[in-house]
Image: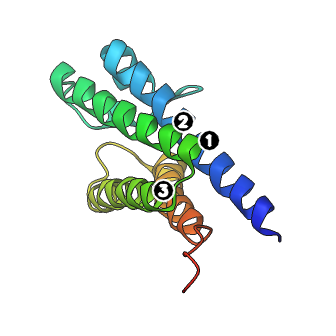
Amino acid sequence: MTGARIGLVRRGGTAALGVVELSWGGWAYFAPASFFTSFPGLGHRWTGAYLPYNEHLTSDLGATFLTLGGLLVVAAILDDRRVSVVVLLGAGGFNALHLAYHARHRGELIGADYGASLVSLVLGVLVPLALLFTVRRPART
């Protein structure tokens, strides 16, 4: 794969992660009760499996997602090596800690919903890590 294509994959992947984080963050921040009872949608309720509902914590989660999403989009736009590394490490670090919590605590999630939630959380760690491997090192002088 050429350097230009790798850059396109990095920028596109980083932007896509940012858009996902922004959509989840906007939902959780501006409609925390809806996010709590309905995330991820289509009849599933992963967040709602961790009772009791707390508007403050759900809104704070939304603020976190909005912040990460904004940083990811900016990193995709700037396509600066240092910015990309810092932002992808931050997103991967947050996602690794988020995964660690849910790997230890099921809440009321069972069966396929628990498995699907863990798969999505693992992807949240692996995708930023994979994108880090596309960041080019500066040429040695």
Q: Amino acid at mark 2?
A: Val
| C-beta proximity under 8 Å, tags 2 and 1 | yes
Amino acid type assigned to the residue bearing label 3 in the image: Ser
35 to the left or right of 6? left
Select label 3 or label 1 by which is in front: 3
Left or right: 29 in relation to 138: left
On the image, numbered disc 3 is attached to which residue? 84
The secondary element bearing badge 3 is classed as helix
N-term-proximal mark, 3 vs 1: 1
Q: Is residue 35 above or below residue 116?
A: above
Q: How is the image coloured?
A: rainbow
The front one of 88 and 7 is 7
Please tell me whether mark 2 or mark 3 is closer to you in this view.
3
Provide the secondary structure element on which disc 1 rests.
Answer: helix
Residue bearing the label numbered 2: 20
Q: Write the residue at 30% across / 36% down.
A: 64
- Per the rendering, the mark at residue 110 is none
* Residue in the image at 26% along x and 55% along y: 105
Disc number placed over residue 16 in the picture, else none: 1
